[in-house]
Amino acid sequence: MSGLKVNSYFGDHMIIQGGMPISVYGTASEGKVTVGLTGAGTKQTASAVVKDGRWEVVFPPISPSYDTYEIHISDGSTEYGFSDVLVGEVFHISGQSNMELPICRTVDPFEPHYPAEDGYIREYRVPVTPRFDGSESDEPGGKWEKSEGDALYQMSGAGHYFAQEIRARLDVPVGLINTAAGGAPVEARLSLDMLRSYGGYDAFLDECTKEGYIENTVAADRKKYVEWVSGMDTSLSDMTDTPFEGECNIPFHFSEREDLWGISGRVWFRRKLTIPDNATFDDALLSLGVMTDADEVYVNGVKVGETGYMYPPRRYPVPADILRHGENEVCIRLEVRTGNGGFTEGKRYCLRLGETIIDLSGKWEYHVAHKAPDLVPDVFFQGLPLSLYTMTSPVLRIPCAGLIWYQAESNGDNADRYPFLFGEFVKMYRRRCGRDIPVIFAQLPNFADVKPGSWAALREAQRKCLDIPGTAMTVNIDIGESHDLHPINKWDVGKRLAYAALRLIYGNDDVPRSAYPVSAVKDDCGITIRMSCPVTAEDPQKFTVSDGTQTCPAKAEVDGDTIRLTYGGISPVTVRYLYEDDPDRAELFCDGLPVTPFEMEITG
């Protein structure tokens, strides 16, 4: 028995990178493995002898096309066969939650933006499996899915819309290798040796690499939560005769009310509504925005949904048989864990009944059912250094056209270090890929972070990453949501990433480009900023200059690729444009795309 196994990257519906050698590999205990590649009127066969438990067969490159191929693998006793194999353009897509976010989370049921099905766009999603042993692996453990039916809505939103634009422009199949994982800083994907060499991580690494670290931590967190909720299990029936002592206007944040500020525990909210006689109950949907932290929701005493953490939108289908014309009641049991409760602004709070929409924003009653000390958050493994290295490393040998990256949110505590860490990550990625693959990354959009200034600093740190050769950055300062870490507009994110890839990788100058500052030079009359290409302006008011202690606004006049600033009162050393966490609008554009926010030292 040879124990023949094929790497899980190889399977039905896979897409192989065109124009590069085709490597088929796996494991076996002994013997010889023969691989056949059939399609487009040709048949190739090659064999390899198992060595040290591994085997690999390499075929010459094939150009991208819509021809289908089959791969057959055999050692004489065990066989594998894969069909509907395509050769096209393959991209690694990675980062954190805004790249991981599936399409189903980006479709607003009230203003839907539905993606088109396309069987020539396919995704291989690697399961998120944090580990801390720093081990190497060849086995990613995923599965290829075509961009059709239910599978489409589980694909990366940003990734799919990126692939959609690439396929439309290049007219080839597009494959995505998805290793995105929510909440993951850059350090999560770095190797143990790299982290050790930087210093500052040793105490954590000594702890997390102990045997049983994950299992013991999970058990401790579970015990902590069970103890925390002990005695909190108030049911809806317990609320029947309970007076709701307060009134509030949803959406709101607990910090806005003195009696709720800083409360952890469980708080009930209640709202009565009237359903008109002409309303139908088919496809009833209750939309309750986004809450912090966890919730259970009831309609007329029947539980219709629950969510265990703060980020997902609360959209709960309501069975027709629990609704009635006339008066109805909605109750929410909100569990607040760290004294930061609330209902996110800018979201829909309503009940949709066909064409009838009943607004649920505004006045609600509430009752504090149980107060508790803040709950120490569970250890979030994928948010820790080293945790995703073993998950990421298997895909580094998969040939690709480039890496598409959307990440930085979880590095907000130390933006100054981000260019170094990201640069180290890119070097590692390229070294392991065997070539200097192009890297296209998404700059963070507008967002009102709880730490003022952190997202503005992160965007500037990302801009500095353009110093890494062979990279491109997209600007998204106009398509975020002030109060949602996960804005649903991923179609523009994907399209802009595609534009950057088309320019950087394929030399396509016919797509929109992003503009960046090149220099800022002071003379006796003001400051001249040179841009990478001509820009246009919409009444620019967001330029400031600083001497290190004082900051003042600067008046801007735009002329092609030149911006002239005038100011008064100080001798500035730096200039900023749109340097805010959540600016209300973008002001400078190039080819219809916003210009990156920036901070620059002034010379001259």
Image (spheres, rainbow, N blue to C red):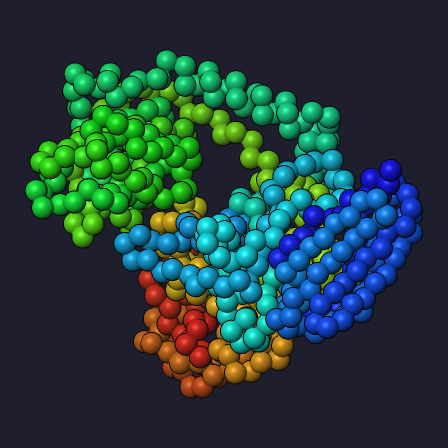
Q: Quadrant of residue 166?
A: bottom right
Q: Is residue 123 visible?
A: yes
| Viewer-proximal residue among 473 and 168 | 168
Judge left or right: residue 204 versus residue 364.
right
Who's the residue at 46% across and 15% down the image? 227
| Viewer-proximal residue among 99 and 259 | 99
Quadrant occupied by the C terminus: bottom right
On the image, the x and y values in percent for residue 570 come to: 43, 69
On the image, the x and y values in percent for residue 233 come to: 35, 17
On the image, the x and y values in percent for residue 321 come to: 21, 33
Q: Name, please, the residue furthest toward the bottom.
A: 559
Judge left or right: residue 422 versus residue 161.
right
Count up the numbered dots: 0
85 in relation to 77, above or below: below
Q: Quadrant of residue 115?
A: bottom left
Who's the residue at 20% across and 29% down the image? 300
| Viewer-proximal residue among 470 and 299 | 299
Quadrant occupied by the N terminus: top right
Who's the residue at 78% across and 48% down the image? 79
Q: Is residue 411 visible?
A: no
On the image, the x and y values in percent for residue 177 come to: 62, 56
Who's the residue at 59% across and 35% down the image? 381
492 in relation to 93, above or below: below
Judge left or right: residue 411 versus residue 133.
left
Q: Name, please, the residue furthest toward the top.
A: 231
Q: Quadrant of residue 85?
A: bottom right
